[in-house]
Amino acid sequence: MPRLNDFGEAFLEHGYQLPGATRNRVFPLATKINLAYTSEPDPSGLPKATVDEVEVFLAGTPSSRTNYFVEQYLVDGGRPGATRDAWIAQRLSGEGARVPVYLQAGAFTLPVPVEPETFRETSQHYAVFDQVVGSNPFNFFDPKSGVLLRAGRNDAGLQVQAAVLQGHDKQSGLATVGADTMASAAQTFGPLTLSLYRYDGRRPDGLGTNRFWRQGFGIVAGDARWTSETVLQTGHDGSIDGGGTPGSSSGGFTQLRYELNRRVFAVARYEGTNDPVNGIARDFVGTLGYRMTRNSRLTVEDVVQHVPWTKHTLNTQYLVAY
């Protein structure tokens, strides 16, 4: 996805409206098309070069207190896509409140320190957000359905979020077990943001129930030309094999993005995961991007994986957004 500049961040923070502009009922509609090539063979037989993603984004503010967002994949990974985010939010605080308060409901991306999909610039996913442990299909990449209460701004001061979510993972085939909960807090000091998060849930596991949790912290810092992002996470499952065997997990990444000039940028990321079933996995992601026009971009990426032997994967993407 094209990276948000300061204007884009303000547009997002103000409910998909121009800051200071008169509110009305028009809505922004955008689309993104991503053509991709990878040297890694697809296990299902898809060609190495494909139309990887076609997405449509719809957002707007039907009233002064209400805004909504829909992210629909028409194509995802070369296959027919599905809805990712579809939510509506209501501002509970008054206009211009020092601490804005929002209540959000629907399907949405979980509030982790670094957005795992929509604004990720690398083809390679963040390993820690894709991590599943044993028979538990939970991960931070997929959106969840529920309600979320947010107090504070995204770009300044203290922000606290609390969510109650459906105890289910889409396409897992497992029954829903009660409700999951998630809480997060982030404090922004100018160019530096420190954040914490915790997720608790239950999943069916054999004849019993696996109670699990994940928790972590993030450090994000940067200025006009560079951004540094680091996330570390730990977790525990009460049963990872259907037989009541407990297990602990961990993972994280550190990533640096640097703009060489207005058209060229580079991203370097080192990441890893560890759990009792999959063991230790490590990889390095190096990406070079070139902004060809105001709404298109070409990226070339090398992924060096150690799981358990070393291998290189070349990924290239051509992205067009309107």
Image (cartoon, rainbow, N blue to C red):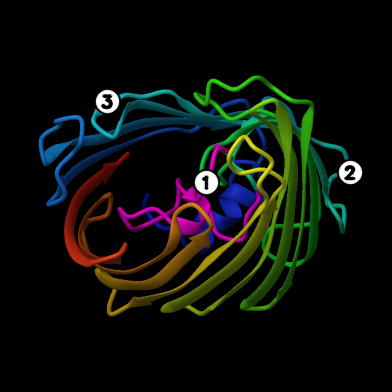
Mark 3 or mark 2, earlier in chain: 3
Residue for point 69% across, 25% down:
207
Where's residue 150, x and y in %? Answer: 79, 47
Q: Which residues are magenta?
A: 111-137
Tally of numbered discs: 3
Q: Earlier in the sequence, mark 1 or mark 2?
A: 2
Q: CA distance from mark 1 to mark 2?
A: 41 Å
Residue 94: image tag: 2
Q: Residue at x 49, y 24 (%)?
A: 171
Q: Nearer the viewer, residue 194 or 8?
A: 194
Please, what is the three-letter code of the amino acid marked with disc 3?
Arg
Quarter of the image holding residue 307?
bottom left
- Residue 149 coordinates in the image, percent (x, y): 81, 42
- The residue mark sitting in front, 1 or 3, is 1
| Residue beneath disc 1 | 132
User: In percent of the image, x 39 and y 53: which residue is there?
Assistant: 125
Q: Quadrant of residue 263?
A: bottom left
Decide which of 6, 310 is in the foreground and name it: 310
Dot 3 corresponds to which residue?
79
Q: Secondary structure at mark 2?
A: loop
Q: Nearer the viewer, mark 1 or mark 2?
A: 1
